[in-house]
Image (cartoon, rainbow, N blue to C red):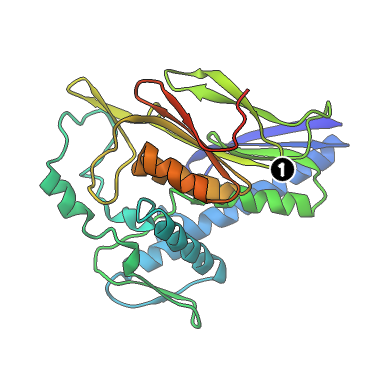
Amino acid sequence: MEKFSESLKLMGNNFTITVVADTIDFAKQSVELAIDEIRRIEKLFTTFSPDSQTNLINDNAGIKPVKVDEEVFNLIERSIGISKITQGAFDITYGSIDKSLWNFDRTMTTLPSAEQALKMVHLINYNNIILDTNNKTVFLKEKGMRIGFGGIGKGYAAEMAKNLMIKNHVKSGIINASGDLTAWGKQPDGKPWTIGIANPDSPQDAFSYLEISGKAIATSGNYEKYIMIGGKKYSHTIDPKTGLPITGIKSVTVISNNAEFADAMATPIAVMGIKAGLFLVNQLPDLHCIIIDDDNKIYNSKNINLR
């Protein structure tokens, strides 16, 4: 068995696609398939290209409904479902938060005032996404509303690329999208794939290992992007209800059978906080999580086996 990996920038993230196959040619071909699929999805959902379906929806906010592909419609519908179960802690209309409020380029020296932040977030409300199932149209009710798929897009792309490769007889592989990953099958030596859970104080070290064959993992951590103000670390994770960054949690790692769901759940669990986050995870089948707080205390949901 041969193992072949390729790393490249897709959807603004570093993707590494690894395939185990009998021949290197088949492995390379399979990786190309996955890359093409991720690029196709990026075209649909990006906000960086003026003619993407996402931008068409945003440009017509408060004006008129926009007809979209069924695939786009369905992802928006699932996103609204996740907003409902997380009570709005996950919300694709977060796109309305203007860059002037949060620009994690370390030039920020003060937090915006609570009033200023609230003014910005009044447009964040998943209840104002109006879907017409018969016509497959999406309408953002308020002018200035914007949707974005930053919280779910790379998980969706990883899941779709994985399914395509499995359909094409790839028996084993990993898709790693900047640390959010999905794995299936076995390593060339017949062992299951394992992953180290990063220690938030030194992300290159692992404090524990998990077997992840047949599973997807996503992490939301403030060690990747944050600002220091007055000696306090503020995460780049924003609470959509207040417009202010969350504090108290260093990282949330979510394990699920589905990469899209894992990706979408990591941030809202951090927003909900330790108690509410764990309570929610324990209600949902096939969902597990590990939370590390600012004092390095580790919390985990039921039925999770850390080694």
Identify whether 281 is placed above or below 274.
Answer: below
- How many numbered markers are drawn? 1
The residue shown at (25%, 63%) is 144
Would you say 150 lies left or right of 190 here? left
Decide: few, some or many residues near mark 1? Use Cα within 10 Å; few <14, some 14-19, many ≥20. Answer: many
Would you say 20 lies left or right of 116 here? right
Residue identifier under label 1: 31
Would you say 33 lies left or right of 135 here? right
Asked if residue 291 shows in the view, the reply is: yes
Picture coordinates of residue 227, whole percent (x, y): 27, 28
Asked if residue 154 shows in the view, the reply is: no
Picture coordinates of residue 42, whole percent (x, y): 52, 53
Identify whether 210 is placed above or below 264.
Answer: above
The residue shown at (49%, 45%) is 281
Quadrant of image for the C terminus:
top right
Viewer-proximal residue, 2 or 307?
307
Picture coordinates of residue 151, whole percent (x, y): 44, 48
Would you say 10 lies left or right of 1 here? left
Identify whether 235 is placed above or below 99.
Answer: above
Viewer-proximal residue, 120 or 86?
86
Quadrant of image for the N terminus:
top right
Q: Secondary structure at mark 1?
A: helix
The image quadrant of residue 212 is: top right
The residue shown at (44%, 45%) is 279
Identify whether 88 is placed above or below 14.
Answer: below
The residue shown at (23%, 42%) is 244
Residue sitting farthest toward the bottom: 134
Viewer-proximal residue, 293 or 259?
293
Picture coordinates of residue 210, whole percent (x, y): 63, 29
Q: What amino acid does circle 1 point to?
A: Val
